[in-house]
């Protein structure tokens, strides 16, 4: 189940090893698995109609996504690494929403990530010569709503029943039952 954010804890960052800014932090096997995922999603899911949700969930599960109940994933949603994605019952990942799941993303029951919203779990350690990949989880708690084209930065938790306005840039945790908007979201 999703963690509660009453105290809004700081989520620790994961630093990935890289020898240069141009090298990949992923192993060869992981890169092959990511390539297979992209091919499968493109060939088997992107073209499917909305009612084929269970088919898309099947492929997500096959690639390691943690699916509880029946969430909805739009056929044009983009999921970078499905094994880092957890979706609960009636959670929604909308049209062209982007789950850039280099690190864990959890979307709670009845939470909505609207069209073209971007959940970004990765950044870089710019103080390191190799600009190592740094990942932090994103948690969208139950009944939260992330508006169209909103951008959620690494390490952010959106509290239960919170609303993030369209086109907002969320740089900090959002308290439960609150509404934020703007750049940065306030």
Image: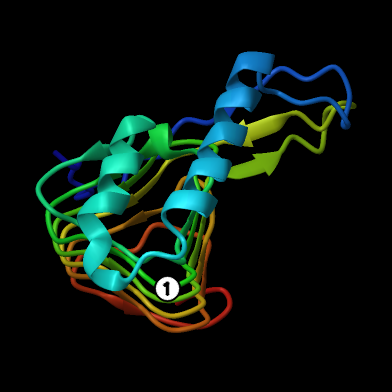
Q: Quadrant of residue 86?
A: top left
Image quarter of the N terminus: top left
Q: Quadrant of residue 58?
A: top left
Horizontal side of residue 74 vs 143, given as left or right: right
Residue under the point 49% across and 36% down:
103
Image quarter of the C terminus: bottom left
Q: Nearer the viewer, residue 36 or 87?
A: 36
- On screen, 144 above or below 21? below
- On screen, 116 above or below 127? below
Does residue 72 appear in this view?
A: no
- On screen, 147 above or below 63? below
Q: Secondary structure at mark 1?
A: loop
Q: Residue 59, how many percent across, how many down?
A: 34, 41
Q: Nearer the viewer, residue 92 or 56?
A: 56
Residue under the point 40% across and 82% down:
165
Does residue 154 appear in this view?
A: yes
Residue under the point 25% across and 60% down:
53
Q: Residue 6, how many percent across, how many down?
A: 19, 50
Q: Residue 113, how many percent across, how many down?
A: 35, 67
Q: Nearer the viewer, residue 17 or 83?
A: 83
Q: Nearer the viewer, residue 162 or 101?
A: 101
**Coloration of the structure image:** rainbow
Horizontal side of residue 54 vs 151, given as left or right: left
Horizontal side of residue 87 vs 124, given as left or right: left
Residue beneath disc 1 = 95
Q: Residue 150, how many percent across, how many down?
A: 49, 74
């Amino acid at each position: 189940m999703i963690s509660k954010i009453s105290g809004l804890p700081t989520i620790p960052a994961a630093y990935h090893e890289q020898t240069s800014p141009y090298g990949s932090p992923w192993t060869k096997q992981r890169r092959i698995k990511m390539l297979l995922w992209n091919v499968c999603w493109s060939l088997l899911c992107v073209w499917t109609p909305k009612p084929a949700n269970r088919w898309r969930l099947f492929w997500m599960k096959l690639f390691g996504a943690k699916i509880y109940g029946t969430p909805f994933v739009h056929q044009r949603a983009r999921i970078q690494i499905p094994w880092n994605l957890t979706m609960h019952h009636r959670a929604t990942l909308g049209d062209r929403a982007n789950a850039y799941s280099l690190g864990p993303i959890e979307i709670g029951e009845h939470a909505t990530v609207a069209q073209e919203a971007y959940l970004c779990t990765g950044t870089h350690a710019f103080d390191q010569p190799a600009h190592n990949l740094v990942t932090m989880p994103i948690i969208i708690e139950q009944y939260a709503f992330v508006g169209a084209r909103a951008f959620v930065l690494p390490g952010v938790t959106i509290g239960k029943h919170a609303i993030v306005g369209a086109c907002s840039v969320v740089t900090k945790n959002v308290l439960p039952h609150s509404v934020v908007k703007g750049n940065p979201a306030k």
